[in-house]
Image: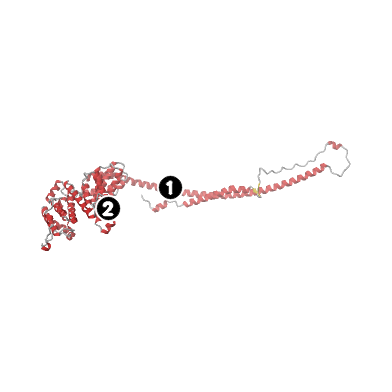
Amino acid sequence: MESDPASMAEHKHTNRWMTMLALGLLAICLLACLYILIGFPAEAQTVGGSTIDPATTQVPASPTPYQPRRQPLASYAAPAAAPVTVQSPAALHTDSTSDEIHAEMSEVHSQLRQSQEALQQATQAQHRVRTTSALFLGVFAIIAALIVIQVYQQARAWDRDASRAVAEVEAVAAELKTVRDARSEARSTLPALLQDVGEHPLSFQEEGSAFSPRAQATIDDIDDLAYQGQGRLVFQDLSSEPEAAVYLNGLLLSAVAHLNRSDPWTAFARLDQFFSQMTRFPDAVERRRITQAYSYRALAGYMVLEAQDREPSWQRKTERAQLESLSKQAFTDIAHAASVDPDWRHTTFVEALLCSRFYVPEETADNSSRSDLFVRGLRRAVSLYKGLIEERSYRGPSRRNLARCLKRIAEQTGEKSDFSDFGYGLNAFPTDEELADEVLAARQPASQDRFLWQWLLGDEELFANVERLNLAEYRAFWIRMLDTKVHLRNWRADLAELQRIRPAMKEWNVQLLQSDPPITLANAISRRQERFDNPASGA
């Protein structure tokens, strides 16, 4: 589920800067308090640049009151002496003691004054500390209030986010339930569709029109279930080989359907996904399915090469490396298919197609000219087509392509034997009556292969461009051949209908419906006519 950007903006906590500011102020205040708690008491204990230590400073005790010494009683009994002017030693001692006492008292008073001054300074410093502490306590209270407010707002925001998240999870859960139901339905529907279609579409090239409208619609559903729409979601977590087998068979049939529609790139995507899943489940499908996938990927490569070969020469030159890589990959797929299941004849048919147009020599260091390689590939294709016809496999398309290959060889080489092979090859084709019997014997009454000669009449390869053949001889050869082979229908009427449908056919070099030009000495039939009248024995 996608969220609205505006709602996502609401989810963000816009008061984050307040939290950072509060934390910064708290850190500053903490440092200031540490300074005050450590610095101010030391200042309070300092007096006049000196520190008073109560443990070491002793305040002198109060002086003892003076008490005069008493004389012994004997002294009072003695007769009084004559008065003298000189003081006695006791009087002198008493005076000196009194002076000392006065001095000590003065010193004590001085120390008391200093103590009182230090006490007053300590009291003032203590007052400042208390005032500052109260101030910072107030600041801390403000910061604590800001933090509490911020935490409260954050808690409310988190609560709103949690509510939204719960609502979104519930919505996603509902959607996931729908997806799970769709996945289970798709996984149960796809096998039934595959069984309904069966094997027939995999041989769509062997008989004329293998894809009936109903089968085509079913394969469209298979394509949607296996690849498009829900396909990747339904089969993204394959957990067992039976599920992988269903998915792989769906991909294979989807690729064949797109090839039938001449959409090779889409078929490439399906087949690449097929082989990607095969690496995870190598034993999910039978070996013949793997062979079919390889051969159809080679056919997709041939169709891409054929489409690019019709592009302008300057564009083909820029894409030469890609074309060579694609042709090599196609022949590699052919080799893989033949090694896995040699009995799958579609591999032979695709190999013949590739050899007839994009032959790749087996020898990597082959220095043959392009024309020699072209003829070598055509002869290889002719051999493969003849083998398929003898094996009764892909007979309809093999006969059409065989006629094209023989005509190309004859034009390329100009040899008498090659012209004779071309005439002999067409003469060996069945008549339209025999073709109808073949179709009925194969239980394919709707097959288009019964109209082989009509297919040849509309083949651009045979009539649009004739370079090294005498046009009059070539035209006369085809008229005699069609008169001999076509009995069930009027080939001239069929050709006229084709020209009405495809006006471009009227511009082809060979026109079988035009009146025969008079033969004069200047336009005499050359000796090449015998190449068509008396075809060689076939080699």
Q: Secondary structure at mark 1?
A: helix
For this orientation, the residue located farthest to the right is 82
- Name the side, left or right, on which 166 lies relative to 61: left
Q: Is residue 515 above or below residue 186?
A: below
Q: Position of residue 85 (x, y in %)?
A: 86, 44
Observer-nearest of 325 and 284: 325
Q: Position of residue 427 (x, y in %)?
A: 13, 52
- Name the side, left or right, on which 43 lies relative to 225: right
Q: Residues within 10 Å of mark 2 (few under 14, many from 20)?
A: some
Please name the residue shown 74% across and 45% down the image.
105
Please name the residue shown 40% across and 47% down the image.
163
Q: Amino acid at mark 2?
A: Glu
For this orientation, the residue located farthest to the top is 74
Q: Is residue 176 visible?
A: yes
Observer-nearest of 208 and 120: 208
Q: Position of residue 389 (x, y in %)?
A: 17, 48
Which of marks 2 and 1 precedes in the sequence?
Answer: 1
Label disc, if present, on residue 282 of the rendered structure = none
- Give the residue pinned by disc 1: 159
Q: Amino acid at mark 1?
A: Asp
Observer-nearest of 448 and 4: 448
- Give the residue pinned by disc 2: 324
